[in-house]
Image (tube, grey):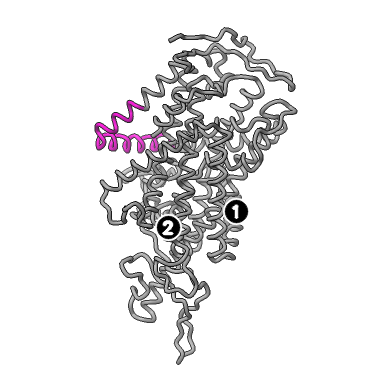
Amino acid sequence: MEEVTTAKAIDDEGPSKIPSHEVPEIDVPLRETEFGGIRFNAVTSFIGVALLWGFAIYCMATPEEALANLIELRQNVAKHFTWFYIGANPAFTFFLLWITYRYGHIKLGMADEKPEFSDTEYFAMIFSAGVAVGLFFYGVSEPLWHRASHWYVEAGYRSQDEVDQWAIMLTAYHWGLAGWSPYCVVAISSGLASFRFGLPMTVRTSMYTLFGNYTWGWLGDFIDGFSIVATVAGICTSLGLGAIQIIAGFQRLGWFGIKETDDVASLTSANVMVIWVITILATLSVVSGLHTGIKFLAQLGFGIGMMLLVLVFCMEKTHFLLNLMVQTLGNYLQWGIFLLPFWTDAFGQLKDGEGRSPEGASATWWMDSWTVFYMAWWTAWACFVGLFIARISRGRTIKEVVSYCFVAPMLYSIIWFSVFGGAGLRQARQATELTLLGETVYNDTTHFEVPGNPLCYRVPQESIMNEFKNVTFFESVMPGVTPVCKFDTKLSTSAWFNVLYSFSFPGSDSDESEGFGPFLSALSIVAVGIYFITSSDSGSLVVDHLSANGRKEHHSIQRIFWAFSGA
């Protein structure tokens, strides 16, 4: 084993601008250890490995104690730092808008350099790394969750129409500019430092203007080491959500002997098995490289997601979804840029004895379980997604980067949640309508209930009328969209598949074995699995960069090690 320290340091005045026709890499005094052909920063790698494996061993050795301590820690963080998580995000947003206006023409690379990837490949890889698995997990369930517990609902004087629109609005806020602003800040700063000034592509490099040459010492090692921890922690969150959604799909389809009646232990074993299988596939992808496995899978996953989006958009009440998209965009522009990004729910987080309102206050847990959770999740992922976006943005201007990784994902999120979340909300409202219809016409609230499933209701395929009084109780206008289901927070993972199973063949009796449900569900499981792989492999690629001082080429053993560490 040999420790190597690069010889050429940057002078005290910082890196000079490199001519546009030539951007050589600049040697900086970073610690580097070489062992068996593997080059890595021993201090940075040790920090990452020690914290990750130490935390993993603690959780496995004392799971109940670890769970209790982590919940308490999360609550304390939300209690004392909500203002910081919430306030930092609009600062990122407005900073990005300013630099786009002022410096949008500057390229991440040489002035005459062309983008490394096409626009379609570029957006597909950005999207697959940034949010993909979560859109499937929360696509239907999050708007349904937001029909209760938060400050807008608890005011008590909103109509159900207003509540449901706000539910879509909140979801779009969580997944819009708020999520992508930290990514873009890291991407632009890292990309400029690496492709414009020839510095290593690591998180520490982004902070050179703050810390000067200290960036290349112990302080920088700690920054990159902690970035590894944050990256892997963020990936684990998404991988956990992906595994849960895949297992929920297996349960619904009855694949691999996994049933909806299985106990917790069986489902836990199934989740672990899914994670390991996906990790092995992700390892093969990351070993194959950025231009082969990652690029291909990102485009494949995005294509399947678009297919699902178009199919549901066409089979649902299309003009309703179009109305909802336009309405949500208007709400977002009005409330999602200035009101919600600064909303900390200060009074709603007060507990009894602290001045809490006796009525109309939101649940004390809501803010830290949703908005603060999201802001922390996006921040943890900023190291990973930001560096990954920087890695694939060579040859693009700042304006292009902001357009593709800030504005376009926000618009796509509004479309996605308007379609899937809108379908879930409309069907939940129709299920409630059928409950009242059963009571009114048949004096039985369960008349339309699906046998064995108290949450779902069969939609009559013909109009229901009182011929003597010439009164229409129910008019059938959407043949084939049945059954429709209410939402149960304890079964939130089933909400996605409830919507997919609602698309039966027109004129059929809507048995669950018929219709488009199994096909759409299988398609979504494949998409989640692919996005699962792309999140894991792109994350492993970034961790390789961080542990190897920003080197673009890594030994296959390094890639395999970090891929499995993320599992």
Q: Residue furthest top?
A: 7
Crowding near the residue tagged with mark 2, few <14, some 14–19, many ≥20 C-alpha atoms within 10 Å: many
Q: Which residue is mark 2?
A: 497
Q: Nearer the viewer, mark 2 or mark 1?
A: 2
Of pointers 2 and 1, the one earlier in the residue sequence: 1
Residue 174 visible here:
yes
Q: Secondary structure at mark 1?
A: helix
Does the magenta portion include 98? Answer: no
For the N terminus, which image quadrant? top left
Q: Nearer the viewer, residue 11 or 563?
A: 563
Judge the density around disc 1: few (<14), some (14-19), many (≥20) Cα neighbours within 10 Å.
Answer: some
Q: Is residue 413 found left or right of 254 in the rendered image?
A: right
Per the rendered image, the range of residues in magenta is 53-82
Image vertical order of residue 28 relative to residue 289, above or below: above
Residue 421, compared with residue 435, is above or below; it is: above
Q: Residue at x 58, y 32 (%)?
A: 185
Image quadrant in which the C terminus is located: top left
The image position of residue 399, as x and y in percent, is 68, 36
Question: Does residue 63 show up magenta in the picture?
Answer: yes
**In the image, residue 38 lies at what x, y percent?**
47, 18
* Main secondary structure type of the part rendered in magenta: helix
The image shows residue 106 at horizontal and vertical percentages of: 71, 29
Location of residue 482 by image quarter: bottom left
User: What amino acid is at disc 2?
Assistant: Phe
Q: How many marks?
A: 2
Residue 329 - label: 1
Marks 2 and 1 close (CB-CB < 8 Å):
no
